[in-house]
Amino acid sequence: MIIDDIESFESLLFGEEEEDLDIDISFLLHHYGSDFANKFSELILNLQAYAEAKKNLADKFIRQYKACSQRALKAKSILASYMEKEGIEKIEGSSFSISLVNTGGKTSIKYLKELTEIPEEYISVRPEINTAKVRKALEAGEQLDFAELEQRGKHIRIK
């Protein structure tokens, strides 16, 4: 029955392990006709909705992660400011010790002038392809030995 085929295919898609999704679409379309097309379309739409729900959930977790990280940074900043103001370099506890230390790595650079006022020898310029100009030339029929227009891809549209 088509429902069994769709459900087994759906279980492959929702399974925890990545499995081979090699199914004979040609056979199923021929054998089940429009009923298969309807069910398969429903499956795709459900998977898209499921993916969107998972993305929204992931976005929520990312927002929570960022909020917690910001709170931790703020707490560290408040403590660092206090320790610096009071001249305290270390606070000992029974489980942890807190030290006020210099940040590692290279020191930051604060630029005092605008880019146009900085001598040329300190400015790097990276070549960049002018994609809009290349596209315009190719679309006008010009032959370029370094680029060509690719064929558009194909995708499934469900109405």
Image (cartoon, rainbow, N blue to C red):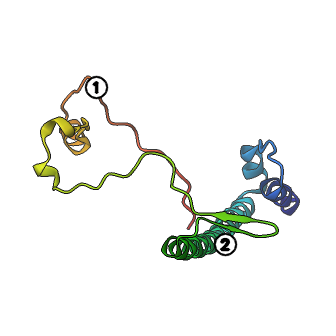
In this image, 57 relative to 94: left or right? left
Q: Please give the name of the residue rendered at 58% of the width and 71% of the height, measured from the top-left corner.
A: 76
Answer above or below: position of 133 versus 144. below
Q: Please give the name of the residue rendered at 23% of the width and 45% of the height, measured from the top-left corner.
A: 132
Mark 2 or 1: in front is 2
Name the amino acid, label 1: Phe
Where residue 138 sits in the image (x, y, percent)?
23, 36
Name the amino acid, label 2: Leu
Towards the viewer: 79 or 40? 79
Where residue 10 sits in the image (x, y, percent)?
80, 59
Residue count near mark 2 (Cα–Cα under 10 Å), binned few <14, some 14–19, many ≥20 = few
In this image, 112 relative to 155: left or right? left
Q: Please give the name of the residue rendered at 81% of the width and 54% of the height, measured from the top-left corner.
A: 9
Where residue 58 sits in the image (x, y, percent)?
65, 68
Could you say which disc has been placed on residue 146 in the image?
A: 1
Q: Which residue is mark 2?
A: 57
Towards the viewer: 137 or 121? 121
Mark 2 vs 1, N-terminal side: 2
Answer above or below: position of 17 versus 81. above
Answer above or below: position of 31 versus 141. below
In this image, 2 relative to 80: left or right? right
Q: Please give the name of the residue rendered at 31% of the width and 31% of the height, measured from the top-left corner.
A: 148
Answer above or below: position of 152 versus 78. above
Secondary structure, mark 1, is: loop
Q: Quadrant of the C terminus?
A: bottom right
Residue count near mark 1 (Cα–Cα under 10 Å), binned few <14, some 14–19, many ≥20 = few
